[in-house]
Amino acid sequence: MFNFHKDHKKLVIVALSVFVILSIFISVVPASNLQYVQPFPTDEALTEAERAGLNVYVQENCVACHTQQVRGIEMDKMWGDRPSLPSDYYYTKKRLDVWRQSPSLLGSERTGPDLTNIGKRQPGEGWHLLHLYNPRSVVNASIMPSYPWMFEEKDATRITDEDVVVPVPEEYLNEPGKKIVAKPKALNLVAYLQSLKQPEMPGNEDVEFIPSIKDDLDVAQEARKSGGVDGEKLYMNTCAACHQQSGKGLVGAFPPLEGSSIVLDDDPELMLQIILAGYDARSDYGVMPPFAAQLNDEEIAAIANHERTSWGNDASEVTAEDVKKVREYVMEMNQ
């Protein structure tokens, strides 16, 4: 009966049957269950520009180097507030026709950082555009390729009000004096990247990451920094992409913090206002996004203190209470 080597017909039928059964239980049944996944209440559908940017993301094969999945282990905690869930991908999955569905964006390589929460980690449009034009201009050791075809060089006299000018430092321009203008393809891609923000779970339930073993001394040292908040780490994750690890900024793009009169001012109110509400210097530098919704008072105080006491800066420290007062003032001004 099972003498397959003499009966090829039975061999093919059994092999095909096993393949079909396995396909149903491994692929079809799990996929059908995913059809019942619903988005989080705070999540929003992609806009037309964001959807166009998603298509650019796929076309440029960004998924080859970037993931969009936060695993439930502590080393992934830097990429998101919680591990990723099927509902996070509700609006990015789209059936193209009866036979095809949009490609998965989970990714399997982290040649570049995970992008799950990049819209919160790096919300500024100017930074993203500069990074696309020349990644080395903002991240010295970056191996990401440049995308100059998404931009156009223009004379200053040809700039219109509708043009989005990228604050590219002179040293990265092909022709000095030219202005770099973002094309719609670049603007759409940045709009999609800015939309990548982990939505809050209903009820704000905490999903725990699996902890890793840490040296007790390192934990104790970290807890002593800024009342338990590590200002240097927060600065590296939030601010260093623009102002650089050295605090020197980028000439023509992002202002220096080293020796800055605003950072060193005895009265930190203006500095805290800028961190909370953002700053638009128009022609001087790129636009800085606000961080009031992203960082709490303790975290902003820790970042401010790191900036006021690093790179030769020697200014008095601020407290979370100082930040709270400025936050209340900023909120009143915006009402």
Image (cartoon, rainbow, N blue to C red):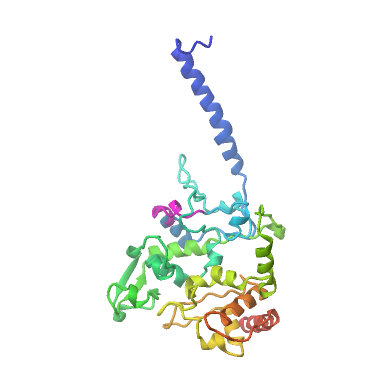
Q: Is residue 191 something one can see in this rendering? A: yes
Q: Is residue 300 above or below residue 194?
A: below
Q: Position of residue 48 (x, y in %)?
A: 47, 60
- In the image shown, does 236 or 93 lie closer to the viewer? 236
Q: Is residue 60 magenta?
A: yes
Left or right, 148 with reference to 76 = left
Q: Position of residue 207 (x, y in %)?
A: 68, 55
Q: Is residue 276 something one can see in this rendering? A: no
Q: Residue at x 55, y 36 (%)?
A: 27
Q: Position of residue 159 (x, y in %)?
A: 33, 78
Q: Residue at x 59, y 35 (%)?
A: 29
Q: Position of residue 262 (x, y in %)?
A: 54, 87
Q: Is residue 9 magenta?
A: no
Residue furthest toward the left?
175
- In the image shown, does 204 or 261 lie closer to the viewer? 261
Q: Is residue 45 above or below residue 235?
A: above
Residue furthest toward the front?
217
Q: Is residue 334 above or below residue 136?
A: below
Q: Which residues are magenta?
A: 57-67
In the picture, the quarter occupied by the C terminus is bottom right
Q: Residue at x 57, y 34 (%)?
A: 26
Q: Quadrant of residue 271?
A: bottom right
Left or right, 101 with reference to 150 = right
Number of on-image labels: 0
Q: Residue at x 32, y 63 (%)?
A: 149
